[in-house]
Amino acid sequence: MLSKNQLGFLYMFLSICAFSIMDVIVKWSVDYPIGQVLFFRGFFGIVFYFFIIPKNRIHDFYITKRAGLHFLRCFSGLIALVAIFIALRSLPLATVVSISFAAPIFTTIFSIFLLSEKVGIYRWLAVIIGFIGILIITEPGITNLNIYYIFPIIFCLGLSYVAITIRQLSTSEPVWLISFYFSLSITLLSFFTIPQGWIMPDLKDFLILSMIGIFGGVANLWLSQSYKYSEVSLVTPLKYLALVFAIIFGYFIWNEIPTIKTLIGALLVIVSTMIIFRREIYNKNIITSKTVND
């Protein structure tokens, strides 16, 4: 039998693998309209979550008293998803993944204004280091006026607000319901893109495209399970394996070789996010000890 920490590591590793495969398929799907790819992400995500809804909630699983917050979570999530899909199709895989690591930096900034959290010198230092890393990675895109470097940053902004809303929703809503509404919103949005001209996929492409929704669904579930069984500070460093996978997949499938600037920038972003996570754990422990002593 595995310990809770070992289970947490296993679920995090599986989640990273699933997200990495989903990214590869999205990058591969360049011949299909983004709206159509969104449909596969949303629809098959819905199908997946129907298998994990508790049987006693099957008739009223959709009921919620926090519809407004669900809407904000879905809206920001859709912005992030569309942005990352565009980025994956237009930039090297390792570059997109490197910039996406910066999401906790923006979450820290949003938490100041939206959750009234106090941010100390260490986390502000982490934010500065992270932004320097982003500038190093995107510098070639800025000099060449490549607007596609903007999309991973938009993804980080959207994902950061998603993290804030999920933190608020999770106090009363089950994880599967939060994910279900997001998948439903993706599917509904995709229908508006049908007039742009969807392409009828053959059976092989249909199966591959459906994997976007399935891998996306299980990846979110495994990520939640990882945080359930283990401390965030223990399993979070595993997330950076996604960069290793991105470099490997990018090289062998698309012959992409990350530049030195990308690797240096990625290292700075990783260092900044690790500082943020460590300070969050430290502050959490301080609060807990004070509560116990009181």
Image (spheres, rainbow, N blue to C red):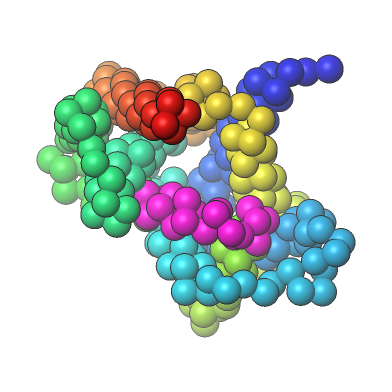
Q: Residue furthest left?
A: 143
The segment highlighted magenta reads 159-178
Task: Kindly tell me whether residue 107 is visible in this rendering.
Answer: yes
Looking at the picture, how far across and down is residue 244, in whole percent?
A: 49, 22
Q: Nearer the viewer, residue 263 or 129?
A: 129
Per the image, is 173 magenta? yes
Q: Nearer the viewer, residue 271 or 32?
A: 271
* Relative horizontal placement of residue 107, taking residue 121 as reference (left or right): right
* Relative horizontal placement of residue 73, taking residue 65 as reference (left or right): left
Q: Residue furthest bottom?
A: 195
Q: Identify which residue is drawn at 48% across, 24% down.
A: 233
Which corner quadrant holds the N terminus? top right
Q: Identify which residue is drawn at 51% across, 79% down.
A: 192
Q: Nearer the viewer, residue 114 or 177?
A: 114
Q: Identify which residue is drawn at 82% across, 68% down.
A: 58
Q: Identify which residue is drawn at 47% across, 28% down.
A: 292
Which corner quadrant holds the C terminus? top left
